[in-house]
Image (cartoon, rainbow, N blue to C red):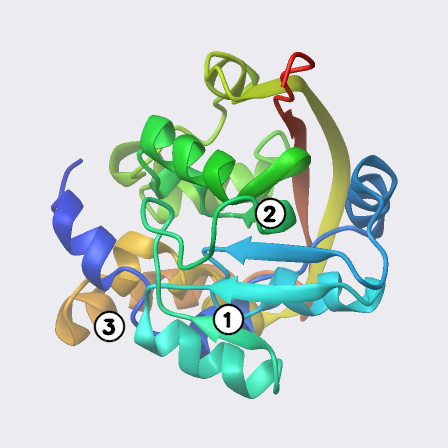
Amino acid sequence: MDGVEDDRVSTRGFGDGSTYERGRPGYPDEALALFARSFGLEAGKRVIDLGAGTGKFTRQLASFGVEILAVEPSPSMRAELERTVPGVDLADGSAEAIPADDASVDAVFVAQAFHWFDPDRALTEIARVLRPGGGLGLIWNERDESVEWVHRLSQAIEWPERRPYPADRDYRAVVSAHPDFVDVSRHRFPFHQTLDHAGLMDRLASTSYITAMSAAERTAFLAPLAERVSELPETVDLPYVTSVYTARRFTDSRA
């Protein structure tokens, strides 16, 4: 990746929880309803929000009355999550070292984070903490670049050159290849985020490789973007395509 080294993105790219919280959207109701139907989300179920960030997905999960363990490695993100979802069970941890007992949860969710994981190690660790037959849910909001002004904005932030992961990857093959998961499926939903100019700038500034820049680099990088944003209507609907994956922890019927 040009411009910012991978280790800087992984260690510093999510060090600004407040900008992430202001700039990033939640997730469509249809996606949450799909997870609820697939995994029977209800009071008494125990779930993990893995790579929980500032709690965008955590607070939507909470509406089902489930018991949530939010796991997040970034101190800044954890601080913001603690503020936005007070009282949540929150832990420092990673996808490759989840702070939970074997077979202790009914579902694990990963919102906008699985692309940062070592997939094989993460899936093995997720399978460890899931009860047999438990659910895995992955979800991403991806900007809909088929819309011309969104495509131009992605070009302006140098996403094609700098992007730290392939945004259009189909993860069905990745999850299906792991021996501990079955019944892998993908669904896609249209979604949008209504933003004013300040909100759109926060959305751009929350991009991992931009956040990972030094303060001086970031200011210089964002200045021409602010000019472009100022030319847009006062309020815009930023369109996304939300990809949702569901899978089940393999259950050996002979056991």
Which label lies toward us, 3 or 2?
A: 2
* In the foreground, 18 or 11: 11
Please say if 131 is above or below 183: below
* Residue sitting at x 83%, y 62%: 64
| Residue found at x 85% / y 44% | 40
Mark nearer the N terminus (2 vs 1): 1
Side of 218 where 139 appears, left or right: right
In the image, which disc is placed on residue 109?
A: 2
Question: Residue 118, located in which quarter of the rendered image?
Answer: top left
Q: What is the secondary structure assignment of the residue under circle 2? A: strand
Q: Amino acid at mark 2?
A: Phe
- State the image coordinates of residue 181 (x, y, percent, origin top left): 57, 21
**Residue identifier under label 3:** 219
Q: Is residue 114 above or below residue 75?
A: above
Q: Position of residue 198 (x, y in %)?
A: 53, 76
Foreground residue among 254 and 46 = 254
Badge 2: residue crowd in 10 Å (few <14, some 14–19, many ≥20) = many
Measured along the vertical axis of the image, is residue 224 above or below residue 164? below
Q: Which element is circle 1 on?
A: loop
Of tags 3 and 1, the one toward the viewer is: 1
Looking at the picture, which amino acid does disc 3 mark?
Answer: Thr
SS under mark 3: helix
Q: Could you say which disc has been placed on residue 54 in the image?
A: 1
Q: Position of residue 126 (x, y in %)?
A: 48, 40
Q: How many marks?
A: 3
**Left or right, 94 with reference to 126:** left
